Amino acid sequence: MRVKQKLLLTPGPSPIPPFIREALGRQIIHHRTDEFKEVLGRVSQSLKEIFFTSSPVLVLASSGTGAMEAAVSSFFSSQDKVIVIEGGKFGQRWKEIATRYGLDVVNYSIDWGSAPDPNYLKQLLESESKVKGILTTLCETSTGTVYDIESIGNLTRNREVILIVDAISGLGQDKLLTDEWGVDVVVAASQKGLMLPPGLSFISISKKAEEFLRRSNLPKYYFDLNLALKSYQKNDTPFTPSVSLILGLEASLNFIREEGIHNRWKKFSKLAKATQEAVKAMGLNLFSSRPSNSVTAVWAPSSIKSSQLVSKLRKEYGVSIAGGQGEFKDKIFRIAHMGAIDEDDLVVGFYFLEKVLKDLGYSLKLGSSIVKLEEVLYA
Amino acid sequence: MRVKQKLLLTPGPSPIPPFIREALGRQIIHHRTDEFKEVLGRVSQSLKEIFFTSSPVLVLASSGTGAMEAAVSSFFSSQDKVIVIEGGKFGQRWKEIATRYGLDVVNYSIDWGSAPDPNYLKQLLESESKVKGILTTLCETSTGTVYDIESIGNLTRNREVILIVDAISGLGQDKLLTDEWGVDVVVAASQKGLMLPPGLSFISISKKAEEFLRRSNLPKYYFDLNLALKSYQKNDTPFTPSVSLILGLEASLNFIREEGIHNRWKKFSKLAKATQEAVKAMGLNLFSSRPSNSVTAVWAPSSIKSSQLVSKLRKEYGVSIAGGQGEFKDKIFRIAHMGAIDEDDLVVGFYFLEKVLKDLGYSLKLGSSIVKLEEVLYA
């Protein structure tokens, strides 16, 4: 079959709606003008709303990993002790970055697909002396698992410990109440729930984190959040911002505000639930014990390599889903429901997924996942 | 007067042609696919051509300063001695970054608007022991000055010293023969000669620089060129690339190749010459003793603050030029001729510039700069 239309169901990039693509293709404006500063001012305000914080949310010209590095190098000092929750590829990334900067990493390693236990974390905080930070993840993209950030926030709120959360894939789908939950730093990026191309990252900074920022002695320049925060007060950036993506961001944030964030959380919760049930209706099993609303990870049938499934789906039908990462590369596949992905996309995606599974020798009744999807979606 | 059409004559961002804006507004493609890897492969090849190097040219998701930092943190080790040529804002930036990373900076400070003396540099290399690198600039954007990189390359070629050149504003207009001149590392960015929005940066790495890269012990992650170089071999990137800007980049590079780089150098040399003569025809003086082909810096009349001139020109006529930086903030203004800026843009720009100068009380015969512009342009 000839691919008629491509469909992205990957946990980043997610599809870009036409009204955002229009903004991305506009003629450039100069970044040191009132015109651009006004855009940046409005965007900063809207970001605070979707981050649920009254603290500054900075916009960086980098992909999400850049903002993760900014968090490590801007808030800590050499040999500071931090707890990293490693339950997937992005927990590993925290560990790698913190190690590169010479932090003393206490690694809380959990099975991929599981979520950290707040009680264990509490013990860890009590037994380890002088922990300065916890680095963790809202939605661990590699496993489709959402962590209980609210409970972790309860542990750090009254300690001299800052809680740093990578919400790169979770923001916009998985509930996150930054201030209310006591999260000090939230890192996010453009190409997931915000429906933009990759290239922008975001980082929020609580008052408590600001104190850490002032004390930090690690080398940095481009990602020095002291510089970024100073410019932020004047709706400016220390280095040339990614202007076109920020014009697109404004379009995205206006759209999200109009739909309402709570409404979107509800919608993605339903899309996630429908995806989970549809997967089970095909006789397959979920990978995660605490599935997120942003991406669903699924065990491939034991007879099928998930990488082959993903590749065939993309090449023959133009549908992109993600395979597994790390040791689960050939064992799981992941379907995203984030950003602009909607119920129709999921129905189309599952239609082709069923076809490919059948082609690869998996026995299932065609249409079974679609019946289940619609049952949940339109109940 | 109502602004009918905006005109950007700033040394970054420069105007984006429609065929590039079309590419920027395309639907996103996934970056871990053959489709994208093929784009990256073609783009890498074209970048080598315009960098005049057979070495890898890496594409980073950051503005130009990010690539400058990558150069410092990836090629050097703590306390390495480097010579920085400080003759403007971007020489200062090298100094700031190198200082942040604990390098031993030998500062060769020159008057803003002048170019470094290769003979003095030679003496410096002979008198200072164990210099590991020279950090300098092709076109110092803040002063509109082009440096004699070829002569500096002759000094480093046979020494254990790498030559790192910030060509962010110069690339595409000011001649740069990376390999032939013995330049080890060239840093560039998207929003100048390449006619793109800001958000991409580039860095080339000679064989000699690769050895420095392997020895470097400074902390880094997002800008670790070891990781980037490893991915580069597979037409991949270690972290999510800025996909839409790279699609735009391909359109830009195809266009530049079609016109021919030597032809473009010739064109910008003529635009620069015409701009210089037009400025003089208005009775004004050039700021630089070695003017670049990318941007022309001009002393404002002593009775006029250049910041006021720039602001009035933008607000009343929609024409953006740049003011001065640092201590020359109110003393000079700068007109860019780079990227997609052409002779017609300059004529329109000077028409409005004359009007504003006259409005501000400067005495000149209206049209005098335009006559001179056309004289040079259409000789």
Image (cartoon, coloured by chain):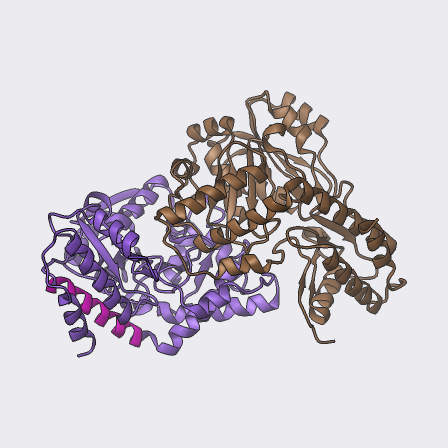
Chain colours: A purple, B brown
Q: Residue B355 location, x and y as percent? A: 81, 67
Q: Nearer the viewer, residue A190 or B113?
A: A190
Quadrant of the rendered structure where residue B318 is? bottom right
Residue A266 lies within the magenta run: yes
Q: Residue B192 location, x and y as percent? A: 61, 51
Q: Residue B33 location, x and y as percent? A: 35, 48
Q: Nearer the viewer, residue A191 or A231?
A: A191
Q: Residue A88 location, x and y as percent? A: 23, 49
Quick check: can you spot residue A76?
Answer: no
Left/right placement of residue B321 relative to residue A60 reads right
Residue B370 lies within the magenta run: no
Q: Magenta stretch?
A: A263-281
Quadrant of the rendered structure where residue B132 is? top right
Left/right placement of residue A1 relative to residue B53 reads left
Left/right placement of residue A13 relative to residue B350 reads left
What secondary structure is the stretch in magenta mostly built from? Answer: helix
Residue appearing at x 36%, y 77% in the figure: A259
Location of residue A319 with respect to A221 vertically, above or below: below
Residue appearing at x 59%, y 49% in the figure: B255
Residue appearing at x 46%, y 36% in the figure: B74
